[in-house]
Image (cartoon, helix red, strand yellow):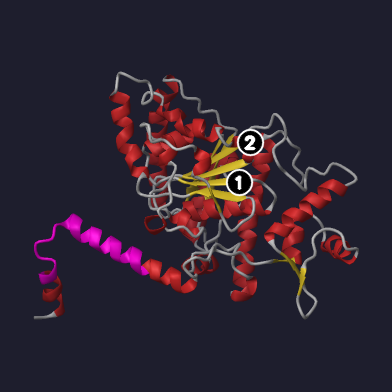
Amino acid sequence: MNAKSSASAETVGMHFEDQILEQGDLISKKLHLLSVQRFPPNAKKGLRSFTLAEVAAYVGVSQSTLKKLHLEGKGPSPQTSSSGRRSYTAAQMLELRDYLDAHARSDSRIYVPHRRAGEKLQVIAVVNFKGGSGKTTTTAHLAQYLALTGHRVLAIDLDPQASLSSLHGFQPELDQVPSLYDAIRYDANRTPLAEIIRPTNFPGLDIIPANLDLQEYEYDTPLAMADKSTNEGKTFFTRISRALAEVEDRYDVVVIDCPPQLGYLTLTALTAATSVLITIHPQMLDVMSMGQFLLMLGGILKPIRAAGAEVNLSWYRYLITRYEPTDVPQAQMVGFMTTMFHEFMLKNQMLKSTAVSDAGITKQTLYEVERAAMNRGTYDRAIESLDAVNGEIASLIHQAWGRRVVG
């Protein structure tokens, strides 16, 4: 009997659902084993230190200013290597901001960009109907960039596949962490949002991980809508915004990684959002899929608005992801979209890079990987692209608060 026949014999009598459950469990266990080999069982995901150049860029001061502070014994003391190179932890960057804020001679808001009185919590929904558009990669790097630049950030993984959670050190099926479903469910077992939030390895960035229970919301909502004894289902679109109201004083920005489907979870996130980021890979089939997504989304949002939903966005933008400028068809597609949606396109694109994919192999983002661990030219091009995109989005956030944006 050959190997193929043997494999078939082993699964005789097993239904498809039993086979995939078995295989899914096997994948989870193998991935957990790899994770344990890299990180001890009780260890938390750490975060590297940042070079003087990185700290200067994120904090918004010159390297000479940082050197002067260190020489004068002001602010946190950086780590100094044997070659004399200084570096700071992410926590120390926050300390630097506080010190600069307290001692600045002029308006010091640029150092501590927290929301001021009257400024609304910014909720960014990152969406696309088609998988593979770089949605989760975009969400993760945006949330981390905002934290590195001094914002208080909450990331919400709304995708049951939990890729954003995995990038931040959570493997839901093994860690048994709760998801947003626990805060927006319709029964008496609803949990306060504050009890679901988890810290990450980035100071200033918290996360609500995902798990498979999120899919239950897609089944529960139609049933709740049909229940005439309550209005809970009829106002399903308010559930995320109501949950966020419990903790909004703790954050400046919420970034939501929506699932790649137009279901109740995505609609609920969109009606809670103050802004929307639509990721798009510049290929013909992807753009065609996005067109269908927009038609369906608009058709669904109209009756929801009529039912009382407020879909009032400060801004929405299309973000080109996984872009290869030397690929002529891709460049043509970007030009095509720019011609149609000029004012709605982010000026910067997220370049396709092996640096991002290589970091993902070890469940890390580019902000977690040290430059020396990669080809420096590849790393520099990728980080420059990420910072440009995320800096542009940060400017849109500040404009929504009515702040003057410099540069």
Q: Main secondary structure of the magenta part?
A: helix
Give x and y (percent) for residue 392.
Answer: 65, 47
Kind of residue indicated by mark 1: Val
The x, y position of residue 173, in whole percent, is 37, 56
Q: Relative to residue 81, is residue 397 depicted above or below?
A: above
| Residues packed near mark 2 inside 10 Å, few (<14), some (14 to 19) or many (20 plus) | few
Q: What residue is at 83 percent from the left and 58 percent from the top?
A: 75
Mark 1 neighbour density, 10 Å: few (under 14) some (14–19) many (20 or more):
many
The residue beneath circle 1 is: 153
> Label 1 vs label 2: CA separation?
11 Å
Front residue of this view, candidates 149 and 72 = 72
Residue 378, given in percent of the width and then of the height, sits at: 59, 70
The dot on residue 334 is none
Secondary-structure class at tag 1: strand
- The mark nearer the N terminus, 1 or 2, is 1
Query: Of the residues shown, which amino acid type is indicated by label 2?
Result: Asp
Residue in the image at 30% along x and 37% along y: 219
Q: Nearer the viewer, residue 107 or 326?
A: 107
In x, y percent, where is residue 5? 11, 75
Left or right: 201 in relation to 336: right
Q: Which image quarter: residue 190?
A: top left
Residue underneath mark 2: 249
Q: Which image quadrant is residue 54 in?
A: bottom right
* Magenta part of the chain: 9-30
